[in-house]
Amino acid sequence: MMRNPRKFCGLACWVILLAMAASALAAAGGYHLIKKIPIAGDSGWDYVAADTEGRRLFVSHGTEIIVLDLDSGAIAGKITGGDDTHGAAVARDLGRGFISASDPGSVTIFDLKTLAVIDKVRVGDDPNGIIYDQKTGRVFTADRGSKRLTAIDAKTGKIVATSENLVGRTEHLASDGAGHIFLNMQSLNTTLKFDALTLKQLATWPTAPCGLPSSMDMDRAHGRVFVGCRSGHMAVLDAETGKIVAALPMGKGVDACEFDPATALIYCSTGADGALWIFHEDTPDNYSLVESVKTQDGARTMALDRKTGNVYVAVAGFGPRPAPTPDKPAPRPPILPGTFNVLVMGR
């Protein structure tokens, strides 16, 4: 006789069943290419950032940030951000946006409605990752050339703090919204934790077996830091202790990961294999691969529209890689003319 599962399935059993159901629900309806949005120009690119509430997508492209309408895909405007733009951060509560650029190092402040430039602030050399933290009202940049963090007051545009020399190559960063900043040190295989007000370094955590840590996002409600590593792993760190609670294999060459708290899905784009990797947070310490979807070789950066669940991936076609020289021991292959696109991946 079949027994009533509600009577004999304990709490732990039900937690497992609910996690399996959530994972199966998340996997229903695989991601695929919906469309390509061509963007003119043959310059390089870096990060892509989605403003879900404002329905805008900010795509770095050479000296400009191309602004796309998230609903139509049409170009809504352009912002000149410097000789080598990297990323954009949005402060909706202030009506401002911020662009990091290596010219040799600045943050351009612009109006979110008009896209007009408000100011330009000199920070450290080669600022790469950039985020806005609403709790402190600050914009933080990871200045690779100067090997430091810089904090800017988002209202005044003034630099209010800088970290000490961090020695290694800085990469992406994240805020927990509770007074802390986390930063990947790619060349040192570590993740650092800082006080968001003083930029004093509070902790250093190794990321092994996750090597060359690059991209980062957080589950702030459960205190988990997601670190995408170019060696081919995603590590999940406890934001209090730094303990690695999970390490999941994925493709190599990642440069962007985003977490959606509404679905408990983590998205990572890997350029070496040209794939979008999607994981599910079953519990704060347990994770499962939902799917790996082909995008395009070199598609290493992406942004998530949390309203639709669509993922926007920047990519271009490449020609043959040049031979190494003393000045450029690891040269990048040239971008083929007319091939820069934003891929829209959805269900």
Image: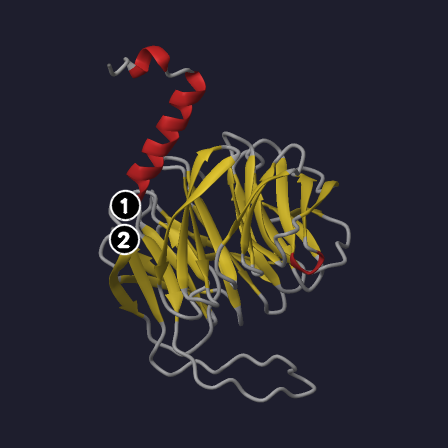
Tell me how far mark 2 sits from mark 1, CA to CA: 8 Å
Q: In the image, what residue type sits under mark 2?
A: Gly
Q: In the image, residue 146 lies at what x, y percent?
A: 71, 61
Note whether 229 is above or below 297 in the view shown: above
- Residue drawn at x 53%, y 72% is 83
- Residue 336 picture quarter: bottom left
Residue 194, relative to residue 143: is it above or below? above
What residue is drawn where x is 52% and y is 40%? Answer: 218
Image coords of residue 115 (percent x, y): 39, 56
Q: Nearer the viewer, mark 2 or mark 1?
A: 2
The residue beneath circle 2 is 346
The residue lying toward the viewer, choosing from 51 and 23, is: 23
Tell me if residue 114 can be seen: no
Q: Residue furthest front?
A: 1
The residue identified by callout 1 is 308
Q: Secondary structure at mark 2?
A: strand
Q: How is the image coloured?
A: secondary structure
Q: Is residue 304 left or right of residue 209?
A: left
- Tell me the SS state at disc 1: loop
- Residue at x-position 38% and y-position 61%: 313
Q: Which mark is residue 223?
A: none
Specify few, some or many for label 1: CA neighbours under 10 Å numbering under 14, 14-19, or 20 or more: few
The percent position of residue 108, horizontal first and vertical second, equals 52, 58
- Residues at marks 2 and 1 touching, judged by CB atoms closer than 8 Å: yes
Drawn side of residue 266 relative to residue 161, left or right: left
Q: Which of the marked residues, 2 or 1, is nearer the chain's N terminus?
A: 1
Rendering coords of residue 106 (x, y %)? 59, 61
Nearer the observer, 176 or 130: 176
Query: In which quadrant will I find the N terminus?
Result: top left
- Looking at the picture, which amino acid does disc 1 mark? Thr
